[in-house]
Each structure stands twice: as C-alpha cells, then as structure tokens.
Amino acid sequence: MKIQIFLIINFISLLLYSQERSIYLNSDINFETNTINGSFINELLFNGYINNTMKDNVLSINTDKHIVNFTFNNSIKYTEPLDKGFSLNFSISDINNLNATFNNDLLRLILKGNYESQNELLEFNQTRLRANRYQQLKLFLDYKKKNSNIGIGLSYIQGNHHLTLISNRGSLFTSYLGESLDLDYDINTYITDTSSFSPFNNNGNGMALDLAASISMFNHKLDIYLIDLGFILWNNKSSNIYVDSSFTFNGIEIDNVFEFNDSILDASNIIDDYDNLTNKNKRFKSYLSSNIGVRISKKVKNDRFGMITYGVNTKWQPYLDDKKLSFKKIKQGFVESNYKPFYYVETEIITKKYSLLPKIAYGGYTNNLNLDLGIKFRRKISVILGTHHLEYLFTKENSRGFGLYIKLFKSI
C-alpha cells in the first residue's frame, strides 16, 4: 500500500507541474486458439449450440496440444518529456488472462462425452490451466540521444486472484454400455483465497522489470525489448490442493423402477481410492507473461506510407516453482508459455483525415496466418479502432481467434 501511495502522489505532482504531457487510454480484448475456428466460436456465442459436424471438425485437427488463451486488459498511460533527452511514462493497467493446454482425448470428452468411447481408454495427460487477475503500476524512464535510446521500467503488481491447475496423469476407461467407469488422475492446484471474489482483493504483491533499447542507422531503426519480466507472490491464505486418486463406478442395479431412490447409490457401487490427498495453506509465486522481442523499422519513401516494421515476439512464462534462474529455467519459461515465435509485418497507410494500420502475422497461440487492421482518426483526441483477427469477419472456417481494441490519445 505504501508503494501505491508513493506512485500516486508522484503521478499527481507530475500532472500539476508538467507543461507538455500526453495521455493514452487503451482497452483490448483478445481470444486465440490453435483448436476451434471462427464458426465454432460464432455458434457457441450467438446460438449456444454446437452440432456434431462442427465437433468432428475440431477433433480432426492434428495436434498433440490444444491451446486456448484469453486476455482482457485496460490501461491508462501518461507521458512527459523531461530535460536532457529524458522522458517519463507512468501507467496503470488492469489485466485479466486465462491460458489452458490439453490433449485431444480431453477435448473429445468435453465435446462428445464418453458414449462413443466404450471399451476405449481416454488419456488426458499434461493438462494445464492458469488464470490471473491483477493491477500493474509502472514507471518507465527513457533516455534518447540523436540515433539511439535506452529505457528501463519498474512495476508494482497488486494481485487479485490466481488459479493454477496441473495434471500430469489422467485417464478414463468406459466399459460396454457404461457398466463401469474407471477414472485415474492426479491434480495439483494452487488457488488464492476463495472467501471473497471481490475483483480488487489484494491477495498478493509482486514486481516486474522492463528493458528496452534502440539504434538508428542506414535508414533503419532496430528495437530490442524485454517487457514485464516479473512475478506475484501470493499470500499465505492461498491453498495448495494435491489429489492422486483412482475412481471406479460399477453401475446401479434396479430391481423395481418404482422403488428407485437415493439409497440405491450406496458405497458398494463407488470405489474412490485416494493414494494421496493434501490441502494446505501456503504462499506461492506465479510469473507474469513476459514479452521478449526485436523489430526493425524503415521509413518508406512514399509519403502515403509511414514506417514499415518487421518483428518477432516471444513470451516467457513458466509455471510456478521455486527453482533458481538457470538455462534450464529459461528454456522452461519459453516452453510453458505455450506461445510460438510471433512473426509480423506492419505499416501505416496515411490519408488526410485518417490512417489505416494493417498487420500480417504468423505464430503466437495460433498456427494460422493472422490479419490485424486498425483505423486511426486524427483529431484533438485521436482514436484508433481495430481488430486483431480481421479474417474472423470473412472466413470463419480458417480463423483461430477474434479480438477488438480501442486506443485514445491526447496531448494536454
């Protein structure tokens, strides 16, 4: 709380004494997956019903790891030039993120149940889910010279809620006509205090580091950055629940349908063997989704175009552990982020009243080509409206996500 008060006081003082300042507002929602297409998403959102043909199309995708990622972020940023080439940025962000991975057997069970899997073993190993909600207060100091600049940022994180679910082993065997079910699984869950789900609960605190540098030469600009390398340490009201169990259901015999009652569901029909079950309160650490990348920009000679930029972005986010930083841990973070290198090309097409901001990309959480498009209206308050997956509007069969964003900018 002391850190928050300190940052807010400094922010207010900058607003009072700054002569040249700018303010940015940004809201961004994005859903991406390598599994379900736009038609599936559309039917689920607007009709609430998915037919078997669409389910079969999803299950026919040949991948060992299905990925689903959802983000909803809102932020406000203030920036001010200082003396001697320095500038200062202060931002407040509200961040929500869900990321999950699972295999084809689990997806099959979710979409179609176990009726079509009689006398068949479904294995759903390596299932992962994590969800985060937190606020971030960031100060970023940038120093610019003639052909280069360097910046460093430090963030305070207020953690609201977190859930991590890790299952390394899981299987379900359904006998003919469902006469018996055999379920075997282990689940390790970390979850913050569940006594209150107020959206702004303070259940943890953390910090993050930003580093950025650029250099201009030969009519090109090279940018290298590391954004939001950090963690949240959740408080001791958090729970760690571990279950290692096998479950067998032998069915129900009914002699008289008119005498069916709860007493039929006796313990002899269900065998639940807990090899290991623990539930304890403890502190734990989770990591932020860090962005690491490089981009090269060049000014196009045609006045109708702004900079054209080629870039690649990666993410680093290991699942929680207490291991020290090492080459193995660095590799772990890239693998467990579930994010492939994201290659993109973007530019600006300029007209008198507005600009178009097209972007072509490949990778990230999807395996498809992604098309983004924004429209920038230059006014006293400039506005950018855009979509992350333009292909969703035209070819839902081939799209693997949808997203919208709005940005507002004003010099004060």
Image (tube, helix red, strand yellow):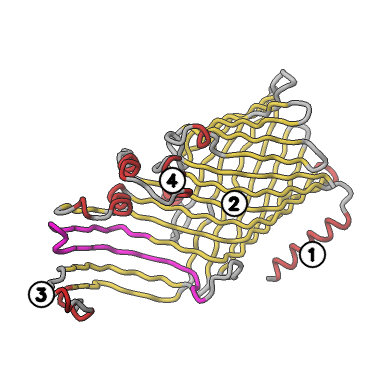
* Residue 267 seen in this snapshot: no
Residue 43's tag is 4
Which of pointers 1 and 3 indicates the residue nearer the eye?
3
Front-most of residues 346 and 255: 255
Residue drawn at x 59%, y 31% is 359
Q: Is residue 342 left or right of residue 91?
A: left
Q: Residues within 10 Å of mark 1 (few under 14, many from 20)?
A: few
**Callout 4, which amino acid?**
Glu
Asked whether disc 1 touches disc 3, contact meaning CB atoms under 8 Å apart, the reply is no
Q: Is residue 107 left or right of residue 46?
A: left
Q: CA distance from mark 4 to mark 3?
A: 43 Å
Marked residue nearer the N-terminal end (1 or 4): 1
Which of pointers 1 and 4 indicates the residue nearer the eye?
4
User: Looking at the image, is 357 positioned above or below residue 168?
Assistant: above
Marked residue nearer the N-terminal end (4 or 2): 4
Query: Is the magenta region chiefly helix, strand or loop?
Result: strand
* Label 1: which secondary element: helix
